[in-house]
Amino acid sequence: MAKVITMGEIMLRLSTPNNEKFIQADEFDVNYGGGEANVAVSLANYGHDAEFVTAVPDNEIGECAVAALRKYNVETKHIARCGERLGIYYLESGSSMRPSKVVYDRAHSSISTATEADFNFDEIFEGADWFHFTGITPAVSDAAAELTEKALIAAKKHGVKVSVDLNFRKKLWSSEKAQKVMTNLMKYVDVCIGNEEDAELVLGFKPGDTDVTSGELELAGYKSIFEQMVDKFNFEYCVSSLRVSHSASDNGWSACIYSRDTKEFYHSKEYSIHPIVDRVGGGDSFAGGVICGMLDGKNFKDALEYGVAASALKHTIPGDFNLVSRKEVETLAGGDASGRVQR
């Protein structure tokens, strides 16, 4: 199996139980998660040698976050203990026409103040096959953006393939800042993952007449922007998840991919996900599935189908992490969506 490194912020997630609104909640459910950590858990769960790199405070809460990763066989030996605190996010899970809401409390978190001196990147990337990061980490702080580029430089020095999930977060930075920082980082990237909003707000590409709020997907627009992105950044693959939001509880879920070398554009099968148990981490589970498929040597179309199936299943699991097995993903990707009891 391949050695995969992911780097970012792991956070304490406090979510309202039973779809309650914040104002109703007398208690919160506790989970840990974060974009790159979620990908590491997925890949470890599929049997790859996955390691997560981050910084956590040197206290019991920081150790709880590390323990959450170790529970799912993610390597944590290069996690730095430094900084003031673990970031927190509060989640109010929506239902039907009421959307989910996220409130961040992550200012001055450990990863936001960490520097290159806290990590030995040559040691971290020795023997690695793949490095994954997201647009969330550079958005956390200028120091985190600089740290991300240092990691990317080291990854390329060691001949490691790099993927990014663009993941624009408007509560963390503006589109103008995102485009300035992320455009600079794209020269290190081989596989670019992101939805239509990410492509526009992070890199400035808009996919035709798509309007996800009305459920309209213009696939020709995606092919056009993928071609432009490959032309500008020389990505090996451009990938996008495609979410049609009928409501917070009912989504259509598929994806598309474009290959630089073959010039082929491919749209996956679409899954109807209803009811959604937890959509947080859905994009990360998609990225983890696509990366797994590529590391397994699947062709890019089969890798995409694997990612879509994996992420469709994630929507049925509470918490940030996707905890499905290879067999479960392969069963769904193979056409069995019956959900029959396994005896």
Image: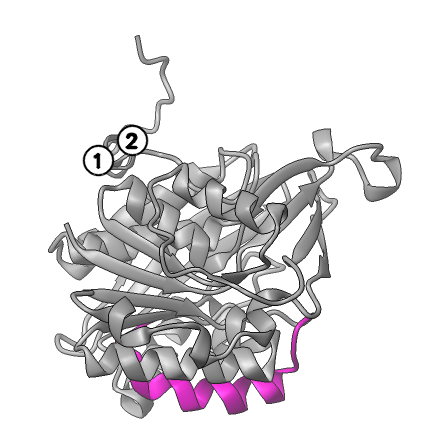
Label whose residue precedes the other's in the sequence (2 or 1): 2
Given residues 69 and 219, the one toward you in this image is 69
The residue that mark 2 highlights is 328
Q: What stretch is highlighted in magenta?
A: 171-193
Please check the rendered image and state whether residue 186 is part of the magenta-colored stretch, yes or no.
yes
The amino acid marked with disc number 1 is Gly
Structure colour scheme: one colour
Above or below, 84 relative to 243: below
297 with respect to 313 (left or right): left
The reply to whether residue 294 is visible in this rendering is yes
Q: What residue lies at 41% left-to-right and 83% top-to-bottom?
A: 149
- Marker disc for residue 253: none
**Predominant SS of the magenta segment:** helix
The answer to if 308 sits in the magenta stretch is no
Estimate the x, y position of residue 200 in percent, counting from the top left. Answer: 52, 79
Picture residue at 49% right of the left edge, 33% below the top: 316
The circle drawn on residue 334 is: 1
Work out how far the residue at label 2 is from the one at label 1, CA to CA, in angstroms.
10 Å
| 112 sits left or right of 40 in the view | right
